[in-house]
Amino acid sequence: MRVLVTGAGGRLGRAVLARLHDDGVTVRATSRQWRSDSEVEWVVADLVTGDGLDEAVSGVDAVLHLASAPKGGQTYQVDVLGTRRLVVAAGAAGVGHLVYISIVGVDRVPIPYYRHKLSAEQVVAAGPVPWSVLRATQFPQFLDDLLTSSSRLGPVIGDRAVLAQPVDPGEVAARLAARLVAGPLGGIEEYGGPQVLRFDEAVRAWREARGSRRPLLPVRIPGRLGRELRAGGLVTEALPRGVRTWADHLADTYGGTGRR
């Protein structure tokens, strides 16, 4: 199997490349700038302009579409219009399966980035290529970065009742690889971490791992956004789940106070 991976330079992309290499899959990866790698065929392609997409999809059996632009003002151009360009090119090239990575909660949580991800899902589903969508919960690195940024002024600021379900990117990569082998789902699969945590629980473990005494300053997120986040808009009951916990991430990152 020859697989094209977009967004291969990101956190999930690097994990996917490693997983596919271990599985013996021939990988082609896109980048907006030239890269050289003895184990991966890198090609230059741009989702915003469409340059290089026809060449990128030529001769591949499947596409893992991981590229996204959550910041920088190009989310619509990359995630929606860029996905449409990729789908059209893949259809013309006779690609047999397109797997799109999305996020648990894009259909519930009213965040502009999530609306674009949901629109991209709909582009994939309406396109000519047999497809699968995998919605994953948040990575522990994202939660870690969020807590770091929210504590820059001293206390950790956040809504203590928000629910999160961190999932390891390596485990998401393994799930994506399994979806490739299983073939097109023609639907949406959800995949989350092993534990659902309240924000205050995540903060407590994070402080212990870092040896920090910074208190939690509870700030209730208002409106529909807050209601959805507290009601579990970012978590899923889908099985199977990952096995690596928030405590595992903290122990690996900070040494921690032991796994729980």
Image (cartoon, rainbow, N blue to C red):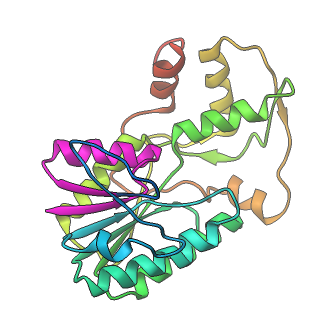
Relative to 170, is 58 above or below?
below
Residue 15 drawn above or below residue 87:
above
In the image, taking residue 143 as reference, residue 91 lies left or right, namely: left
The quadrant holding residue 210 is top right
The N terminus - image quarter: bottom left
Q: Position of residue 252 (x, y in %)?
A: 45, 20
Q: Is residue 79 left or right of residue 224?
A: left
- Pick the residue in front: 245 or 74: 74
Compared across the picture, whether 214 is left or right of 259 comes to: right
- The residue lying toward the viewer, choosing from 197 and 70, is 70
Question: Is residue 260 visible to us here?
Answer: no
**Residue drawn at x 35%, y 43% as measured from the top left:** 15
User: Which picture quadrant has residue 203?
Assistant: top right
Where's residue 24, x and y in %?
12, 48
Q: Position of residue 175 (x, y in %)?
A: 30, 53
Q: Any magenta on residue 26?
A: yes
Q: Is residue 140 visible?
A: yes
Residue 129 in the magenta stretch? The answer is no
Residue found 25% across the figure and 48% down from its top: 40
Instruction: Count up the numbered dots.
Output: 0
In the image shown, does 97 or 178 lie closer to the viewer?
A: 97
The magenta stretch is: 1-29
Give the quadrant of residue 150: top right
Residue 165 horizontal/vertical position (percent): 53, 45
Picture residue at 69% right of the left edge, 57% below the top: 72
Tell me if 80 is positioned left or right of 63 in this view: right
Residue located 35% across and 55% down the image: 239
